[in-house]
Amino acid sequence: MSALILALAAGAVIGLALGALGGGGSVLAVPALIYLLGFSPVGATTASLVIVTLTSVTAMVAHARDGNVRWRMGLLFAAAGIGPAMASGALADRIPEAVLTAAFGAVAGVAAVRMLRTRPVADGAVTVRPGRAAATGAGLGAVTGVLGVGGGFLAVPALVGVLGMRMRNAVGTSLLVITVNSLAALSMRAGTLEGLDWAIVGPFVGAAILGAWDGKRLATKVSGHTLQRIFAMVLLAVAAFMLIDALL
């Protein structure tokens, strides 16, 4: 199968996940770029940031039209992650490839388990703890910078549990957080953009953007819990493969 077809297929799946779940699709971008398209771990994380940024903006616009983006809360949450995202992004190319792969596999595994254990949260007021919110936002920024993921798979649970958002609002707002974190991390990797294979990254981005719109529509027809469980099982398989690959 040609690299172009693989890029289009992977991009569509990742966009679908981002549009439907407000995160998670970016966790699949790095392994897809490494194992399907032959990118190095550093190149894959940089390319992933490009893909995630553009796709998240598209999905965010779709959710914003329905009033599901809480702009002020999302920007405050994301602001705490800008510094860590930039700092960790600058250090990413100094980390050994095996360590980067193992770290990504571990984070993917934790995210999958968290998704499987998450249950719908009842609507209601939750007291916001600024310190905890800032710490969570900073942690998401650090993960974004090192691993090239937007952090949406962690942002949605955090926005619900820490900031008390309804699930639908958390999905839309997480896309704002992803966009800010990804841009901050990408700003520290500008020098690595020239080395990317844009003949692959370009179609990947295009398919992901189209998939994001389909994901938004899918979210209105299939329960979020069902989508979340399916994605978590796929993510577990990816995590196991990457950890084995890093250790062997």
Image: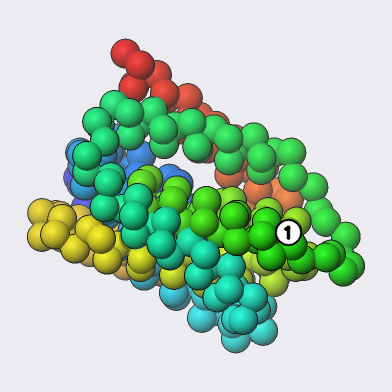
Q: Position of residue 221 (x, y in %)?
A: 70, 65
User: At numbered mark 1, what does the secondary structure look like: helix, strand or loop?
Assistant: loop
The quarter of the picture where the N terminus appears is top left
Residue 117 can be seen in this image: yes
Q: Is residue 90 above or below residue 39?
A: below
For the point 52% across and 64% down, which residue is it?
Answer: 80
Q: Toward the viewer: 37 or 165?
A: 165
The quarter of the picture where the C terminus appears is top left
Relative to 61, 167 lies left or right = right
For the point 25% across and 60% down, which residue is it?
Answer: 188
Q: Is residue 25 above or below residue 79?
A: above
Choose top left, top right, bottom left or bottom right for residue 87. bottom left
For the point 57% across and 51% down, which residue is it?
Answer: 153
Q: Position of residue 5 (x, y in %)?
A: 26, 51
Which residue, as the protein is rendered here, is positioned at the far top? 248
Q: Is residue 184 above or below residue 240?
A: below
Q: Position of residue 9 (x, y in %)?
A: 36, 52
Which residue is label 1 attached to? 162
Amino acid type, label 1: Val
For the point 52% across and 51% down, which residue is it?
Answer: 139
Q: Position of residue 76 (x, y in %)?
A: 58, 73
